[in-house]
Image: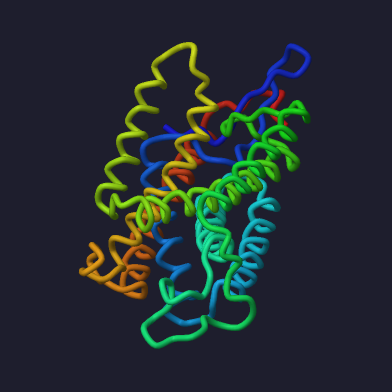
Amino acid sequence: MTKPFTEIDVAGGGKYVMKKLPEITLAFWIMKIAATTLGETAGDLFAQTLKLGYFLTTITLFLLFVVTLVIQLRSKRYNPFFYWTVILSTSMAGTTMSDFMNRDASEKYLAKGASSLGWGPQGLGLGYPVGAAILVSLLIAIFIMWKLTGLTLAIRDIDTFRGESLFWSAILVSNTLGTSMGDFLSDSSGLGYADSALLIVGLLGLLLALKYVPAVSNVMLFWLAFVLTRPLGATAGDFLTKPIAKGGLDLGTLGSSAVLLTILFGLMGYAHAQEQSNIAKLENDVIPANFS
């Protein structure tokens, strides 16, 4: 059962605080993959299908991320709709941020006969290796800063505004990095969508096995898995939307996004019902006197 409260030690005594982030369960990872796959298809829908371009779409989706993040940070407890909406917004923004960094307006990335993609710069064209190096450096810098604050990196114990802000900064960069990895595997590695997905699933299976090795940090495994589930979502999204000639199912960005959004909202509704049930059960129990 998901616990709506977490306990930390303060001067040798227990202090109970309301949880702001979810428990890491199988349901968490299913929702993460659904959200990141939707982030890929929705980001491509705005930038490519609707021809808004990488630059304008990135600005719009980053502003959406800021709005959803403010709502999450102001929340007093874990709310599945708030939390997963931020995850979705980071996935969508990460998709177009990665595309803007790595791609350009060459014919390779444009529809047949098109000469530009949206308003503003058409992409920096850094390429996947350079883009990934920049994002890895940013992510390492965030973790170093986080470590220097002395705050916990374990998601289940994050209970401060500062810690949660660092958490979401790492989430945004890791989702952008994951998009770059997924696009590289799908577009440039020669593996294709299905083989790329199988490779990532294999790596995730290895991380799961390492979870049972005492010497390996579970916190490190969580963040590695979090980054890897993003390219899994990217390759799955490409597999759903890309033409059959390129190894995809050609379902289109609009249709795929609609189906994925329905699935994600259904999972969010289920998670919300579970959370409310857990809180109701707890209210019928005796809450410790030193709860704050």
Q: What residue lies at 40% left-to-right and 55% top-to-bottom?
A: 234
| Res 244 quadrant in image | bottom left
Image location of residue 205, percent across then percent down: 32, 31
Residue 199 shows in this picture: yes
Does residue 49 appear to the left or right of 201 in the view shown?
Answer: right
| Res 101 quadrant in image | bottom right
Front residue of 184 and 139: 184
Image location of residue 7, percent across then percent down: 63, 24
Image location of residue 289, percent across then percent down: 69, 24
Front residue of 75 and 195: 195
Q: What residue lies at 49% left-to-right and 32% top-to-bottom?
A: 222
Would you place residue 147 above or below residue 69 in this image? above
Q: What residue lies at 38% left-to-right and 53% top-to-bottom?
A: 233
Q: What residue lies at 44% left-to-right and 68% top-to-bottom?
A: 42
Would you place residue 129 above or below residue 70 in this image? above
Would you place residue 10 above or below residue 115 in this image? above
Does residue 201 appear to the left or right of 165 in the view shown?
Answer: left
Residue 271 shows in this picture: no
Image location of residue 133, percent across then percent down: 59, 45
The way the protein has been coloured in the rendering is: rainbow
Report how many numbered discs are placed on residues in the image.
0
Would you place residue 210 above or below residue 122 in this image? above
The quadrant of the image that shows the C terminus is top right
Does residue 30 appear to the left or right of 275 in the view shown?
Answer: left
The quadrant of the image that shows the N terminus is top left
Does residue 199 appear to the left or right of 211 in the view shown?
Answer: left
